Structures are given as C-alpha cells and as structure tokens.
Image (cartoon, rainbow, N blue to C red):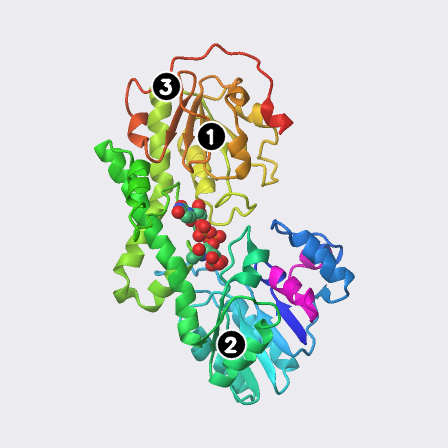
Amino acid sequence: MKITVIGLGYIGLPTAIMFANHGQQVIGIDVKKNVIEMLNEGKLHIEEPGLKEELHRAISSGNFTAQFEMEESDAFIISVPTPNLPDAYRSCDLTYVKDAVQKIIPFLKRGNVVILESTIAPRTTEDVVKPLLENAGFIIGEDLFLVHCPERVLPGKIIHELVHNNRIIGGVTPNCVEAGKRVYGVFVKGELIEASAGAAELSKLMENTYRDVNIALSNELSKIGDALHINALEVIEMANKHPRVNLHSPGPGVGGHCLAVDPYFIVSAAPEQTPLIQQARVINNSMPNFILDKINGFMKKINGKKITICGVTYKGDVDDIRESPALQIVQLLDEQTDFALSIFDPHVKKPWIETDFEAAVHSADLLVILSDHSEFKWITEENLNSMNQKNIFDTKGIIQIKRNQEVNIFDMGSLYQMKKKNSLAPLSALSTGGNEWKKQ
Ligand code: SAJ
C-alpha cells in the first residue's frame, strides 16, 4: 500500500516510519524545510527513544521518503498540529487540518482512505472535513473513506505503544471503519476498536481530560496538605492502596500539547456542560504561581540569593518544552524576583541552559526539580558540594537523596515544612568533593 503522511511531528513521523518498516511505501510530507532535509539525512528533529534506528531502517529499505510534494496514494494520514485558538474557551484551531485536506483533494482517487490522526474538536470529522471532501465530488463511504483514528501513544514510549496500544477506528460509515482497519491492521497488534467518528473524537479528548481532572484533584490535595500541615504524598500513597482509588501525582502544573490543550476542545464545544473540566484547568494552571510562592517564601526565609532549576521540559525524559509549567516558573522567577538563576536540563539544548551540573549548582541556595528526568535520580549529595546552602525542592519526587542533617529536601507532600522556621539543616562546611555528576 502507498501511504502519504502529512505532518512529521511527534506522532506523524513515528507513524510514517512504522508503516515503512512494515513493508508499505510511505511518503512523509511537512511544511518545514529543515525537517525534510534532516529526515532524508537520517537525522531527527525530535527526541524519542529508538526512533533514530527505526528511521535509518525505513530509509535504507527505500520505503520512506520525506518530501514537500504531494503524490497519489492509497491512504492519506493527516497528523498536523491542532493548537488552541486565543478565544474565550481556547477552541480548536483547525487551520492546519483544513489546509492539509485541501492539499490532498487534487490527488484523491476512488477507493482512497483519508485518516485524521490529529486530535480534533468533537464533530470535526463529520461537520468540517466530510463537507470539504463531498464538495470535491466524493461520496463518503462509497468512493472515498473517511476515518478519525486518534493516537494514544505516550511520548517516550511511542515506538512500543504505536504497535501494542489498541486503536479506535472512528469511521463516518461502517465501510469507512473497515477501510481504516485495513490500514492500521498492517502493524497494530492491539485491538482495532470500531467506532463512529464522533465517538472517536470525544473518546480521545476524554482520555486526556480524565487525566487532567485527576491531576487537578491531586494538585488541590497538595494545597490542602500545605494548609493543614499534612503530608499529601503520604495521603496519596495510602489512599491508592484502596483497590479502586488512583490519585495521580501533584506537581508544578500540567504541560505538553495534550492534557493542557485537549480539555479546552470539549469546553469550547459545550461550555455550559463543562464546569468540572473548566475548574480542573484553572487548578492546574494555578500551580506555577503556587510553586513560585513556595520558592519565594523559602528563599526569603533562608536569605537565599541563587536558585538552580533542574528540568524545563513539560515532563521527564523528553526534550519538549511546549506548554511547559517548568518554563512558566522560570519565566515568573525571572520577571518577579531578583534571584540569580541557573537552568540545567540534559534533554534541552538552548544557549540559556547550563550544560555542566556542578557549574549550575555552584553557590546556589536552592535546587528546584521541575521535570522528572531519569538523570536526576543519580544526583548525589557530593554533587551538591558546591552549593552555598544544600536545599532541594523536588516537585516531581525524582530525587533519591534522603533528607539529613546536611541536606534539606522538600516535595509536594512537605510544602508546609518550607514555611517552618526550624525546618533547615545547619549550613554544611563547603567542601570541594568530586563531582559524581560528570562521571555518570
Ligand atoms: N502529570 C502530572 N501528574 C501526573 C501525571 C502527569 O502532573 O500524575 C503532568 C506531567 O508532568 C505533564 C502532563 O501532566 O506535564 C502530561 O503528562 P502525561 O503523562 O499525560 O503525558 P503526555 O501528555 O505526553 O501523554 C498523554 C497521554 N494520555 C494519557 O495518558 C491519557 C498519552 O497516552 C496521549 O497519547 C498523549 O497525552 C496525547 O498525545 O494525547
């Protein structure tokens, strides 16, 4: 089968490569010149474990080419961005989706399958895309098949989840569902779930909204624990021992182009019916300022001058800083305080990111962990010897060092400790111990 994938981002590119490595002839199309050039040279513009090897396999087999020009194909997969519009309910911007549909229309033939993978507002497939294709003279379900097949892969585990997650095949008609199943049956080992296009759209959005609302509940719990001087993380650990309770992890906020985006697509489609979803977004969006207040209060108490921020990505072990609450906190600190700031993130290459851990923590009074990168598990007490005061505020629960006389460690469960007068270990005698970090 010849497949054209439009949009070579975090989802489109792995999807295109997966089809190519399962014997299909795949063309990858993107509007970014550097993306096309990098991919054809076997280089990646995104960080995803295992993807580079898969890309090289796809190129060397001759089954994958990245290019600008559209070509006739058996199936067209649209995986372009659908950001929020800056309107009252931050509705779904369908500009790129509509552009992509217009671009493929001249190349469509009878029997083709058009698949929308982008996360879209409820009813988009039926009410927006279907009319565009019908206006071009096609009868959906007879000479053209239209499917919404949302992705559910977790960045950082995309290669595995693309194959093993089940997939919802949301067809405009039953024939469309069958056509969609024939395409994804090429490599999906998970269940191919038959659905209507509308149910597929809303299911995808609800999956992320469910997570956003549950994270908001835990973020609210961290505020309750702060007010009542009760350790919220201990409460979560105990409550989750109940067979039907799954409290999520509180943190510095909810980032990424999924949970921080998708709930608004439901809200903007049904604003009167979504008070809970809207309030959850308000709570999660309040976390960067909440964390800033904790940092400010603590630094004033210890008369701190310098803060080292570890992690600016929206979550651990990715290089994605889109909608990152960590980055919001850095910006708030920069705009609203006079603290010296040093930023360290081994996954992000930017001029303002310190590449040497020891240099980043040198003379710092507080180390704030905002992304749970695996590398931060290996931070040892010795790595902190160049700090002025050994204080850690670990908002992601990744640090393995145990709190002791030398190091003060706070997390989302012990926020109330940051306010206490005597919550500090005495200053440690500065030593020039070796830097384990560099040797990792
Ligand atoms: N987060 C918390 N507490 C938690 C879990 C996550 O604060 O207990 C934060 C993370 O730090 C991050 C944000 O929420 O800032 C999103 O994290 P995530 O683990 O949900 O990761 P995403 O957004 O990359 O992936 C989600 C996944 N959706 C679900 O798990 C329901 C993934 O399966 C989707 O395919 C993806 O969104 C997407 O592309 O829609």
Q: For the point 70% across and 53% down, which residue is it?
A: 53
- Residue 7, horizontal then vertical, whole percent: 60, 64
Q: Position of residue 322 (x, y in %)?
A: 50, 49
User: In the figure, 85 relative to 427: above or below?
Assistant: below
* Residue 435 x/y as whole percent: 60, 21
Q: Judge left or right: residue 325 versus residue 156.
A: left
Q: Residues within 10 Å of mark 3 (few under 14, many from 20)?
A: some
Closer to the chain start, of discs 2 and 1, is 2
Specify the amino acid type for callout 3. Answer: Ile
Disc 1 target residue: 400
Q: Amino acid at mark 1?
A: Gln
Mark 1 or mark 3, earlier in chain: 3
Q: Which mark is residue 311?
A: none
What is the C-alpha distance between the residues marked 3 and 2?
58 Å
10 Å neighbourhood of mark 2: few (<14), some, or many (≥20)?
Answer: many
Give the percent coordinates (x, y) of residue 424: 35, 18
Quarter of the image containing the C terminus? Answer: top right
Q: Residues within 10 Å of mark 1 (few under 14, many from 20)?
A: few
The image quarter in which residue 265 lies: bottom left
Mark 2–mark 1 distance (CA, rounded to whole Å): 46 Å
* 131 shown above or below 22: below
Please determine whether, in this image, residue 299 is positioned above or below residue 48: above
In the rendering, which numbered label is found on residue 147?
A: 2
Residue at 48%, 39% in the rendered image: 372
Dot 3 corresponds to which residue?
Answer: 302
Question: Does residue 174 show up magenta in the picture?
Answer: no
Magenta region: 14-37
Which amino acid lies under the numbered mark 2 shown in the image of this protein?
A: Val
Q: CA distance from mark 1 to mark 3?
A: 23 Å
Element class at badge 1: loop
